[in-house]
């Protein structure tokens, strides 16, 4: 069975929303790009919520000529949305109903891992249903200092147990913590 791997940026104060607005760490390092590319090489599909899709699509669809952009653009993408009807990013399919059932079906299909970017209500629902197998938290070494409850990794009612399987420290100070769901072990 395929695994779902969530990869999310988070600050020290738990903020996950709008990383494009966070203080710069001097650009995305080559080492960070290599980590992201290795993750995409382990995957044969991308899973996004509408909010993350709307942030990713215009940026990544306009890039090419590097392994990360080329891989991300080539992979099939699944977007969970009840409002998006005509996606513009190539290889994109909209999941308009029953995202839990759709992801269960994707996991049963032949293939390797599925990467999910962003940790909003969709990721919390997957975690609650035991569909989130691995979590990569890219911890950025600063506090944003503002935000609402919707901007935080934490959500009321969410719970899950994970086991640390790897730690990567980038020169920028970003620490990538890789966890495996305790129920998947």
Image (cartoon, rainbow, N blue to C red):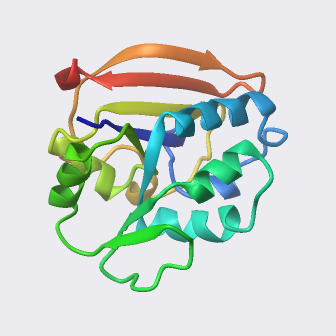
Q: Tell me residue 31's x, y (percent).
A: 74, 27
Residue drawn at x 41%, y 14% as measured from the top left: 165
Residue drawn at x 27%, y 75% as measured from the top left: 96
Q: Is residue 11 visible?
A: no
28 vs 106, nearest the viewer: 106
Q: Tell me residue 47's x, y (percent).
A: 40, 55
Q: Tell me residue 183's x, y (percent).
A: 17, 24
Q: Tell me residue 156's x, y (percent).
A: 23, 48
87 vs 55, nearest the viewer: 87
Residue drawn at x 17%, y 44% as measured from the top left: 128
Number of numbered markers: 0
Residue drawn at x 78%, y 47% as measured from the top left: 66
Considering the image in quadrants, where does the C terminus appear?
A: top left
38 vs 23, nearest the viewer: 38
Farthest residue in the right direction?
26
Find residue 129 and report its image quarter: top left
Farthest residue in the front direction?
110
Task: State left or right for residue 24 relative to residue 136.
Answer: right
Residue 19 position (above or below residue 59) = above
């Amino acid at each position: 069975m395929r695994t779902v791997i969530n990869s999310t940026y988070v600050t020290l104060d738990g903020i996950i929303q709008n990383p494009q607005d966070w203080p710069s760490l001097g650009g995305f390092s080559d080492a960070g790009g290599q980590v992201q590319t290795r993750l995409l090489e382990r995957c044969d599909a991308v899973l996004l919520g509408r909010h993350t899709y709307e942030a990713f699509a215009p940026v990544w669809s306009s890039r090419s000529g590097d392994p990360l952009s080329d891989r991300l653009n080539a992979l099939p993408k699944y977007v969970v949305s009840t409002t998006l009807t005509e996606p513009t990013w190539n290889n994109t399919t909209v999941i308009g109903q029953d995202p839990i059932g759709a992801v269960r079906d994707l996991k049963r299909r032949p293939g390797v891992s599925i990467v999910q970017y962003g940790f909003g209500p969709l990721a919390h629902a997957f975690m609650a249903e035991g569909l989130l197998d691995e979590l990569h938290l890219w911890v950025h070494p600063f506090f944003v200092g503002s935000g609402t409850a919707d901007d935080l990794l934490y959500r009321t009612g969410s719970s899950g147990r994970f086991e640390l399987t790897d730690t990567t420290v980038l020169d920028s100070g970003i620490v990538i913590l890789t966890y495996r769901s305790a129920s998947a072990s």
